[in-house]
């Protein structure tokens, strides 16, 4: 059994995939608005549950994934919007090894969408990255990471404040765990046919107060020419900001070609001071 299959078998994490905009009255099936060919899938990150084991395991939309959120309303002007949610009772890489997210993208492709954009906040951006790296032909055409801890974050203290069932998930986002994961996936690359961009949240020169700038736009993505944009925001408010929502909608709409290494070096000096 491969490592991916072993992780998936161990995880068996519950997931939820729903359409949030436009609302389909009395219809739980996925539908495509006739004139639209673009779908956006919103993927949440860490949702700390210090009091309830049941809430750790149960997938639930975050407030910014709901149909009446500012972000969904902004994206819904030009795209059909969907949300992917997942329980957090397993390590992140185990959740990513399950086929649920690639399968959800495949369902959208069968509906006739030719552009399928994955927008992942924090850990959600890592799931989106794993999905396109492991399933390059699933149908995703673009990934937008928002404040994602590609090389980990300092979450050790938080791991001691959540329910036991959520500890593996939180610990899998720590720097040591992410380093080991990335080393084990060193042969993985963002597919050439998938556009990829990192939104680097920065509130004062040292990251978004949870994830450092260079974790949000790490060296391995820089080496692949993945573009990045730095925005003033804090980690847990980024997806609730009108300003960030408009920028996400712009990135969804516009092409995001790979950067030359010269442009990467210039941006690195400006954003990361190195």
Image: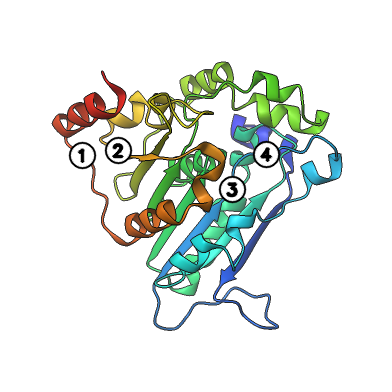
Earlier-in-chain disc, 3 versus 2: 3
Number of other residues with Cα within 10 Å of mark 4, as a class: few under 14, some 14 to 19, many 20 or more: some
- Between the residue at mark 4 and the residue at mark 3, the CA separation in whole angstroms equals 20 Å
Give 100 or 52, whichever is nearer the viewer: 52
In contact (CB < 8 Å): disc 1 and disc 2: yes
State the residue lying farthest toward the left: 262
Helix, strand or loop at disc 1?
loop
Q: Which residue is mark 4?
A: 8
Residue 5 locus on image (x, y percent): 64, 37
Q: Which residue is mark 3?
A: 44
In contact (CB < 8 Å): disc 1 and disc 3: no
Give 214 or 32, whichever is nearer the viewer: 214
Q: Is residue 75 above or below residue 241?
A: below
Q: Residue at x 31, y 50 (%)?
A: 193
- Between the residue at mark 1 and the residue at mark 2, the CA separation in whole angstroms equals 6 Å
Earlier-in-chain disc, 1 versus 2: 2
């Amino acid at each position: 059994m491969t490592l991916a299959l072993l992780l998936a078998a161990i995880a068996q994490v519950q997931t939820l995939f729903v359409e949030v905009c436009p609302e389909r009255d009395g219809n739980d099936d996925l539908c495509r608005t006739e004139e639209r060919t673009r779908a956006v899938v919103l993927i949440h990150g860490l949702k700390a549950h210090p009091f309830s084991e049941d809430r750790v395991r149960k997938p639930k939309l975050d407030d910014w994934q709901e149909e009446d959120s500012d972000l969904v309303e902004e994206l819904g002007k030009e795209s059909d919007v969907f949300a992917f949610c997942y329980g957090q009772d397993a390590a992140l890489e185990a959740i990513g090894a399950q086929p649920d997210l690639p399968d959800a993208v495949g369902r959208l492709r069968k509906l006739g969408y030719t552009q399928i954009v994955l927008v992942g906040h924090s850990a959600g951006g890592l799931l989106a990255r794993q999905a396109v790296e492991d399933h390059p032909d699933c149908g995703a055409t673009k990934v937008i990471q928002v404040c994602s801890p590609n090389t980990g974050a300092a979450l050790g203290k938080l791991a001691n404040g959540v329910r036991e069932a959520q500890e593996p998930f939180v610990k899998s986002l720590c720097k040591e765990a992410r380093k080991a994961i990335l080393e084990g996936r060193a042969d993985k690359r963002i597919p050439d046919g998938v556009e990829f961009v990192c939104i680097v949240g920065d509130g004062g020169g040292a990251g978004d107060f949870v994830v450092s700038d260079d974790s949000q736009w790490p060296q391995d993505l820089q080496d692949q020419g993945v573009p990045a944009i730095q925005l003033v925001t804090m980690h847990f408010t980024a997806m609730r900001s009108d300003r960030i929502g408009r920028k996400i909608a712009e990135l969804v709409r516009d092409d995001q070609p790979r950067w030359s290494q010269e442009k990467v070096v210039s941006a690195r000096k400006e954003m990361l001071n190195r």
